[in-house]
Amino acid sequence: MTTKVIYFLINGKEEAAEFNSDDDAEDVRETFRAAAEAGASDILKLYNTRKNLVNISPKLQENTPSTRYRLEVVAADYNKNGLLPSPSGSYDISAIDQRLSALEKTVFIDNGEMPEPFRELKSKVDNFKEKLENVAHLSWLGLSKDLSIGMNQPFWHKKTSPRKMESHHKRVYERFMKFTKVHVSEEVRRELKKQSFDNWQWDDPEMLILLRQMYIDLNLISKLNIDMNVLHEWLYEVYRNYNIVPFHNFKHCFMVAQMMYGLTWLIDLQSKLDTMEVFTLITSAICHDLDHPGYNNAYQINAKTELALRYNDISPLENHHCAVAFDILKKDKCNITKDFSREQFKRFRDGMIRCILATDMAKHNEILNSFKSVTPHFDFNDKEHKSVLMMILIKVADISNEARPMAVAEPWLDCLLQEFFNQSDLEKLEGLPVAPFMDREKVSKSSSQIGFIKFVLLPLFETVGKLFPQLENAIIEPVRDALAYYTEMQRALEEEKSRKDSIVESGDGDKNGLLHTNKTATTSSNNGGDDKSSSNNLVLSKVNAMSLRRGSTTRLTSKHSVEVDASSS
C-alpha cells in the first residue's frame, strides 16, 4: 500500500494530511472536513496555487510545502452550535443571552466571583450581539471565498448514465437538505448577481442552495409567503426532472436563472415590475427546459414523437417543459404557490406559460419585432409592454452564454455542439433531415458562433440595450468581443486550409509534413469532434493572439482544441 502527503492551508495555518492508496473519496473529504473543523453540512472548497478550484478526491495531485493547496469553508451551518438563521437571516440572540446568564449565575455561586476568562467571553458575546443587530456589520458573518479563479471540469467530461439513477438523486437530496442550514457568504451573494458568474465551480446541491438564495435576496419568500421547506422540496423536484444531456440540463437551467437574477439587479427590475412579475421571471427561468430530451423541436416533429403528436407540432418541447413545471406544482409538498389567491395564481400561470413558450427560437423574430415596436415609447405601466419585456428578458437569459468570460462560455459551446452532433448522428441513422449547423461534418466551433452572434445575439442584445443602457458594458460588449474572437479563429482556420490545399496541389505533402500533421491532429470529443480547431500549431498560434479576451486564462494547444487552466484533478 502506497501513501501520499498533501500539504494545505486552512485559515492561514499550515497543515499536512497523509492518504493511503485505498482511501475512497469519502475518506478524503472527511479528512479535510476534520482539518477545517467543519460541520457535516458545511461546504468545503480546495484551491491550488493558481487559485483554481481543485476536486477533493483520491486523485488529488501530491504537492510540496511550497505549493500548498488552500482549504476554505465557503458556506457554514450555524445551527451546529444552536444558531439557526431564519429565512430572513436573523438569529435568536436572546437564547444565547439566556444561556450565558444562567452560566454566569452558576459560576458566581460556585466561585464567589467572575473569573477573567468568563468576563472575556461575555465581552466577546456582547460584541458579537452588537454586530448581529447592526445592519452595517451583517457582511461580517459571511465566510470569504476567492472567486477570481478558473473553471472546474465540465460535468460532461465525467462518465454519467443517460438518466440520473435514484441512488444519485438520493445523495443529491441528502446533501441539499444538509446545506439548507448554511448561511451563504456575502461575497458569494455579491458574485451571484454578476454576469461573469462561473457555474463550473459548483456542484448540483450547492447550486440548489444558490437558487434558494435568489428567492431570499429578492424578498420573494417573505412577500409571497412561501414556506421555506416547500421551496426546498420544489427545488429538488425541479432538479430531479432535468435529464443528464450535454447542454439542456440542470446546470443550464441554473445559468439561465442566474443571468435572469443578475439582470434583475443590474437594470433594477424590482422598481419596474411588481413582485409577482419578478417571481414569474425567476421561476420561469428555472423551469424553462424541464425534462428536455436533448433533441430539439425539429427532431420531435420530423420523427413524429409523442410530444410532437400531443402538441400538434406547435412548440412541442416548450409546451412540455411548461406542463412538467405545473405538474410539479400540483404536488402539495412542492407547491410554492399554495398561498396564492386565485387571481395571483392565474397571473403567475399566464406569465410563466408566455415566458417558457417564448424560448422557442422559432418565435424569435416575431417576439423581437414586437419588442422593437414598443421600445421607442415603452411604458412600464402598460401590461402589454411589460409582457413583451418579460418574454424578451427570458430570451436574453436563455442564450446569454457568450456574454460570460471565455472560461465559462466556451465549455458551454462545447456542450451545445456535442448535443447537436448527437442529434444529427441519430437523424442520419433514421433518415431524417439534418440541419447543416448540427452536422459534425459541416460545422466548426468558430463558424457556428459567427452567424449566431452576428444575426441573433447582437441584434437581440443591442435592441434591449436601447431600453437599458446598463447592458452595454455588462453583456453587449463581451458579445462583440466573442464575435471578434471567433472571426479571428475562423480566419486562421481558412488560412491554414488554403495552405494545406496549396501543398497538396504542389505534390509536396510529405516533404512539408502535411501527412504527419493530418495523422496527429486530435479530434476531441470534448469540443464536439471539431478537429478543425486543433489541426496544427500554426492555426493555434494565430488564434492564441485572441485567447485573452474577457480576462480569460484559456489557451489553445496542439493537444486539445481548447485547454483551460483549471484544477489539477
Image (cartoon, rainbow, N blue to C red):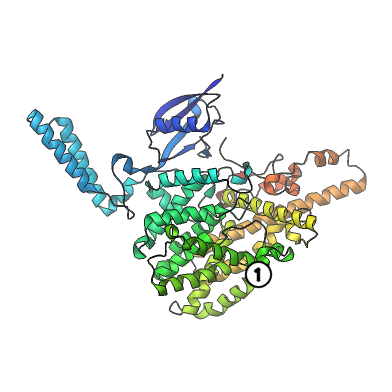
Give the crowd class for mark 1: few <14, some 14-19, many >=20 residues within 10 Å. Answer: few
Q: Position of residue 305 (x, y in %)?
A: 69, 63
Q: Is residue 309 above or below residue 444?
A: below
Q: Quadrant of residue 271?
A: bottom left
- Could you tell me which quadrant the C terminus lies in? top right
Q: Position of residue 92 (x, y in %)?
A: 24, 49
Q: Is residue 342 above or below residue 325?
A: below
Q: Position of residue 490 (x, y in %)?
A: 73, 54
Q: Residue furthest left?
A: 112
Q: With 45 as the anchor, is 485 left or right in this view?
A: right
Q: Position of residue 374 (x, y in %)?
A: 53, 79
Residue at image point 46% right, 78% down: 383
Secondary element at image label 1: helix
In the depicted view, which residue is nearer to us: 431 or 34?
431
Q: With 414 as the anchor, is 149 left or right in this view?
A: left
> Can residue 285 be seen here?
no
Q: Which residue is mark 1?
A: 362
> Can residue 369 be seen here?
yes
